[in-house]
Image (spheres, helix red, strand yellow):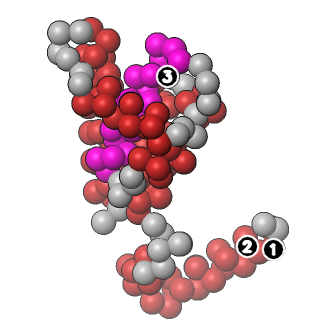
Amino acid sequence: MSNKKVSRIFYIISDMVDSVGLDQAISYLSSYPDVYDKNKLITSYIINSVCSESGLSKDQLMMKTGRNNIRVPALCCAVALLKNHTKSDNTEIGYILNKGRSRVSKYATMYNNLSDKIKSDREISELYDVINEKITKYKLTLK
């Protein structure tokens, strides 16, 4: 997008806020799902949070191959969080994470079968809890 178009968009939005007020402008823009889709915002926030908390880049998280001790817990958390906080099914989550539907199902099952007796499982649960708390706070800012 050219700088002229971006400047024009900001000018229009600024003019809208000046004329109807910030709350009304947000309300108006929120009525267009493609402009302000909470589900997409939450999905993006989940992916970014999982990456930052696990120390992975987005590219590393979404690699097609290569299981390792960092990616598997991160993917388990990402799948569980996406299932719990978005309206996405396994196919959509697979598209988001660059995984097949069956792989998403395996990560979901892995998360659902975590045991408190296994250290690596506890670490996955702790990672989930930290990110889940962040997401819950973030969702409050979207209302």
Vertical arrangement, residue 66 with respect to residue 18, above or below: above
Foreground mark, 1 or 3? 3
Residue 32 place in picture, x, y as percent: 48, 79
- Queried whether the magenta region covers residue 80, the answer comes back as yes
Task: Name the amino acid type tagged 1.
Answer: Lys
Query: Which residue position is annotated with label 2?
Result: 7
C-alpha separation, residue under disc 3 versus residue under disc 2:
40 Å
- Queried whether the magenta region covers residue 82, the answer comes back as yes
C-alpha separation, residue under disc 1 versus residue under disc 3:
41 Å
Vertical arrangement, residue 21 with respect to residue 39, above or below: below
Viewer can see residue 90? yes
Most common secondary structure along the magenta stretch: helix
Give the magenta range.
67-85
Q: Residue at x 48, y 69 (%)?
A: 36
- Residues marked 1 and 3 touching at CB (< 8 Å): no
Foreground mark, 3 or 2? 3
Query: Which residue position is annotated with label 3?
Result: 71
Which is more toward the observer, 18 or 85? 85
Q: Quadrant of the N terminus?
A: bottom right
Q: Secondary structure at mark 2?
A: helix
Label 2: few (<14), some or many (≥20) within 10 Å? few
Residue 102 place in picture, x, y as percent: 45, 37
Vertical arrangement, residue 105 with respect to residue 82, above or below: above
Q: Quadrant of the C terminus?
A: bottom left
Q: Secondary structure at mark 3?
A: helix
Label 3: few (<14), some or many (≥20) within 10 Å? some
Query: Which residue position is annotated with label 1?
Result: 4
Residue 138 place in picture, x, y as percent: 34, 50
Report how many numbered discs are placed on residues in the image: 3
